[in-house]
């Protein structure tokens, strides 16, 4: 049986848990804040990587993030569509019987890419690393946010995970996210700006397939770029 001081400590911990919802993860609060901040930095650096990540979505669906450098390009494929970002254009391709790709100018320098991506893919069940970085940053800055941590392996990649709740002034007040050692988004579960996202890494490759940034074959093109 635990000693009297230990029993008292356990009772006090239980009382704090009931009153405040605090969770002991074995780390000091400062350590958890530093971990969340480090994950945000790690995920932000993923913009310099070349890779293909295939994610499992609910009900057996899949989504794909492809990214390459020199020049920087990204493609987000999801059930019923594909969003392609290149230095020349943004292509929003959607399939409803037939596929239509709407071409617009690329985001202007200094534009927050997360805003466009929330409108473009989060409502379809996918989230991009650049959208998760500000969520982690907001959690690190919010002293009242609750954080628990654990490690896992997804698609053969080691990942560090955080479960966060009670975040104020962010697009998601609570979410679970895992980030691989290289900085690739391994999983995300949460509601972002009213859209539910639940993905986890199923396959990962440090290469990009030829044609990953091409428009879908046979798509109708609507070019809205200035002439």
Image: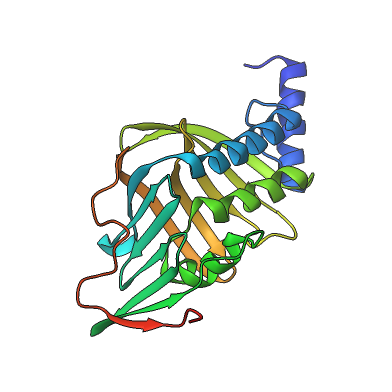
Q: Quadrant of residue 63?
A: bottom left
Residue positioned most to the front: 227
Say which of 112 and 200 sits in front.
112
Say which of 143 and 209 sits in front.
209
- Residue at the spot 40% in from the left edge and 73% down from the top edge: 92
Count of marks, rendered view: 0
- Residue at the spot 34% in from the left edge and 59% down from the top edge: 57
Left or right: residue 184 compared with residue 94? right
Q: Position of residue 47 (x, y in %)?
A: 50, 45
Check the picture and name the quadrant holding the N terminus. Answer: top right
Q: Is residue 121 visible?
A: yes
**Depicted 69 relative to depicted 110: above or below:** above
- Residue at the spot 56% in from the left edge and 56% down from the top edge: 131
Colour pattern: rainbow
Q: Position of residue 77 (x, y in %)?
A: 34, 62
**Depicted 73 relative to depicted 29: above or below:** below
Q: Position of residue 173 (x, y in %)?
A: 66, 58
Q: Is residue 162 visible?
A: no
Left or right: residue 79 compared with residue 16? left
Q: Position of residue 65 (x, y in %)?
A: 37, 53
Left or right: residue 186 compared with residue 80? right
- Residue at the spot 77% in from the left edge and 17% down from the top edge: 5
Left or right: residue 141 compared with residue 112? right
Say which of 140 and 98 sits in front.
98
**Depicted 124 relative to depicted 23: above or below:** below
């Amino acid at each position: 049986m635990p000693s009297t001081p230990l029993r008292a400590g356990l009772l006090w911990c239980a009382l704090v848990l009931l009153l405040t919802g605090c969770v002991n993860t074995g780390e000091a609060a400062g350590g958890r804040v530093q971990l969340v901040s480090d994950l945000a930095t790690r995920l932000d650096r993923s913009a310099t990587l070349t890779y293909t990540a295939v994610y499992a979505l609910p009900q057996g669906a899949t989504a794909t993030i492809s990214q390459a450098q020199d020049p920087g390009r990204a493609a987000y494929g999801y059930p019923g569509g594909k969003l392609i970002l290149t230095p020349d254009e943004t292509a929003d391709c959607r399939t409803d019987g037939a596929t239509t790709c709407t071409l617009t100018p690329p985001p202007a320098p200094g534009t927050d890419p997360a805003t466009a991506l929330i409108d473009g893919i989060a409502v379809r069940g996918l989230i991009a690393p650049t959208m998760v970085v500000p969520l982690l940053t907001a959690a690190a800055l919010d002293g009242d946010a609750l954080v628990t941590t654990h490690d896992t392996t997804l698609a053969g990649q080691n990942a560090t995970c955080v479960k966060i709740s009670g975040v104020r002034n962010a697009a998601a007040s609570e979410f679970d996210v895992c980030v691989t050692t290289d900085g690739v988004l391994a999983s995300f579960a949460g509601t972002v700006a009213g859209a539910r996202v639940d993905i986890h890494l199923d396959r990962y490759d440090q290469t990009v397939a030829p044609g990953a940034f091409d428009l879908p074959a046979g798509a109708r093109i609507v070019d809205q770029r200035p002439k």
